[in-house]
Image (cartoon, helix red, strand yellow):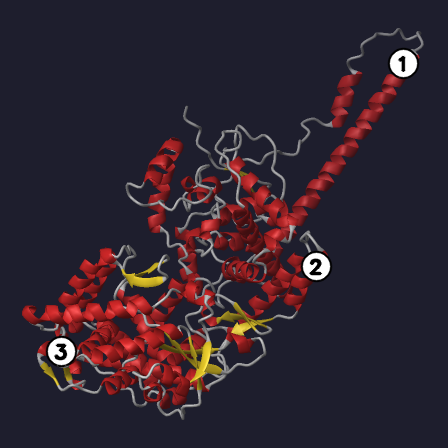
Amino acid sequence: MSETPIELELSAQPSSQPESERGRQPPPLFQLPFPTQDPSNIYQQTQLQPELQLSPNQAKPVWINHRKLFLLFLGFFLCAAILLLIFYMHHILQTRSNNQKDKVVTPCLSPECQWASARLSMSADPFTHPCDYFLFTCGSGRLSPDSGGRQRGQGIPGHPQNQREKAVWPERRAQSKEKENRGRREEKILDRKTLLLQYLREILDSNDTPGSKAVQKAKGFYCSCLDIKSIEMAGAEPFLALIQKLGGWAVSGQWNKTDFNSTLSLLMRDYATFPFFNLYVGKDPNEIARGTIKRYIQIDQPDLLIPIEWNRKTLKSQAKTKTLRPFLASCQRYLALLGALPSSSMIHVGNFMSLSSELAVAAAPLDYRLSKGQLYKRMTIKELQSQAPAIDWLGCLQAAFHQLPLIEDDHVLLHNLPYVVQMSRIIGKWMNKQELSTSGPIHTYMVLNLLHTLIPALDSRFSETEKNLSVALGNTEGADPRWKHCVLETERGFDSVLTHLLSERTAQRDAEEIIQNIFSSFKSKLHELKWTDEKSLHFVMKKVQSLIPKLWTTKRILSEAELDLLFSKVTIGSGTHSFFSNYVQILTLWQKRLRQLLTEQTEEADILSVTPFILGDELLFPMGMFIPPLFHPSYPRAMNYGVIGFLLAKDILHLILPDIYSQSETVHAVGECVWAHYLTVTERAGRGGAFSLSAAQKQEVWVQYSALQIALQAYHQSLMNHPSDPSILGLSQTRLFLTSFSQVNCDSDPYREFMPLEPSFLITVICAKSDLCPTSLHCPSKTLQHSLQTC
């Protein structure tokens, strides 16, 4: 039997909102009764219709007098009721008239608001079709009793889950199809990292002002990255020229047998390439607890090109047997693209794979090294040299961090000393093989690692070869669009320039204000929780009271003059080979950043960070969170609090209360309450289709519901200080807040696997408090004849 589709019914008192906001409204649930007759007429009619006729000389019975008194009393009561009703209606109308005046909103006409208005007008209005909107935005078919949550096969053609959905929801296929089509027209909020990259893309694409020379160089690099035609025309020639600069290689038959450590130092210094070990800068966690902020050079095992796997029986890594054939094919393809003869390329490929396999055996996964205490092993450069003599450690590190006065007694941190020791032995063995002296396998190994570093700067034949190997290894993720790749590469070298440009466009005072208001509302939320024990409450409150929320920026933003000086030696060219040479300069700049990290003790802001974190006693919120469409200073504050305010609150709850489910009974109760709302609206209760939420799911439901409450409370608090908040589309303040919140997409959330329902459904739950919403929302259901409780 097909189930009757859920339809919309808005039940509300006549609204004070503008007509453009309300649209066509159904009749109210009830109307106050208006009398149709005058009480005096009722009394006269009663007098004209006596039930008993009396003679003039006959005395009236006592009950007749009582009847007259009763009728007089009834008439007086009706008159009083009419007067009270008139007074009540006049008071209500006057109050609504005053509210109408109080709630008259000034339209926001800035370009940003016009853009936001157009965007919202194209989206579904949660107050027009709540049932359809809340249940199908992310696909309610993801929920089923046997799934325990979202179905990972959603949207995959031919996936069994899609077939189950058709069986469970046959009556809603038409609605789902309509929703799918509408979704294609709507621009839902993407994940915050993608939004930030899009915003940086707009900055790099803009031609509003010439900008400083450093800004022009950053934009020039970005444009050369997008010039695919020139990159394709250049082909492999730029890399072949670089090989000759390094002394050639045995694959071409022209190699001047350069010194191993000299070549390695050059690759580390100028090309950010580390064939035999990884190199980065960081703190020692053993010293962080003592308040030390010194940074060290950290040496780790490399990211080997050959696919490897961990053998839990032998406790050793090994090359994946199933992937050796596609890996071999990719190596042959690279050599062919670089002009190697088929007759000789197999020898070089074989040596490369043999050397890679030997190095792989010495590598180990992170969890194993952690269990063996191999991380953050401290030693001096001199001690490292004695244990791994094949590498000139001081010379290589001085090259990578040139201009820094490194000496043998400086300490470094090792993350897999057994690998480093074995790697040194393997290199020594291969270098001492007389029969390999002319083929130069060690040198070829380094050149192919350099090729891997520079593939992003070469034509599509190289990237396609890399992609084919990735697919053969089981990776199904699609490649990023070219613009995103180019933004990331630009940030890699011009991070300080982009930080400067982003800070110019960030309304720091407005961002600080919303951070403070959300955090204040969050602290008040903590007092509403029922804690399992006082110890948990005191621990959390002590932690919260010690935190200082603030916008995360660099200690000092570089001026345009300082940026010009910093990038004075960078030359960004244009032409056929321009991007390759530009990319090589980016690698140099990236290595320069490592040197700065080693010498500077301040914590530089990460421009690509989009989530808050705790550093010491500071709760830091990155600038990249406060960008359109999430936030803009010219937006109505209702929009800012409805989107970024909600996201800030959710981030704070996840960060500070990661284990709240075990610390508070409220989380369980609220999670169950919200879920009861969902089951009732979807009519799953009593159908056998309902299933219980896990603890993680209940916690996530509570987190997002609480985040919405926190953001709404913070917004109402801000209205007390700034009551004249403008609006768009003629929407009232609270309605604009909730409508903006409804644009947040559950699929963009990193915790989406734990969220069993579309976040915008929380509007129906929070609107159970009629005083919070501009209208009272409910989805009529034959199985539901009572109102749900407020969560």
Q: Is residue 427 above or below residue 42?
A: below
x%, y% of residue 105? 55, 58
Q: Nearer the viewer, residue 470 or 497?
A: 470
Closer mark to the observer between disc 3 and disc 2:
3
Secondary structure at numbered mark 2: helix
Q: Nearer the viewer, residue 58 or 514?
A: 514
Residue placed at 23% from the left, 55% from the top?
Answer: 322
| Residue 336 visible in rendering | no
Secondary structure at numbered mark 1: helix
Q: Is residue 791 above or below residue 593?
A: above
In the picture, measured across the screen, residue 409 lies left or right of residue 676, that is left
Residue placed at 14% from the left, 83% from the top?
Answer: 248
In the picture, measured across the screen, residue 436 lies left or right of residue 362, that is left
The residue beneath circle 2 is 535
x%, y% of residue 381? 40, 86
x%, y% of residue 90? 69, 43
Mark 1–mark 3 Cα distance, whole angstroms, equals 134 Å
Using the image, tell me which numbered label, if any, was put on residue 63. Answer: 1
Q: Amino acid at mark 3?
A: Glu
x%, y% of residue 383? 41, 85
Q: Nearer the viewer, residue 619 or 466?
A: 466
- Which quarter of the image is occupied by the C terminus? top right
The residue beneath circle 3 is 435
Secondary structure at numbered mark 3: helix
Closer mark to the observer between disc 1 and disc 3:
3
N-terminal-most mark, 1 or 3: 1
N-terminal-most mark, 1 or 2: 1
Residue placed at 75% from the left, 27% from the top?
Answer: 39
In the picture, measured across the screen, residue 456 lies left or right of residue 668, that is left
Mark 1–mark 2 Cα distance, whole angstroms, equals 75 Å
N-terminal-most mark, 3 or 2: 3
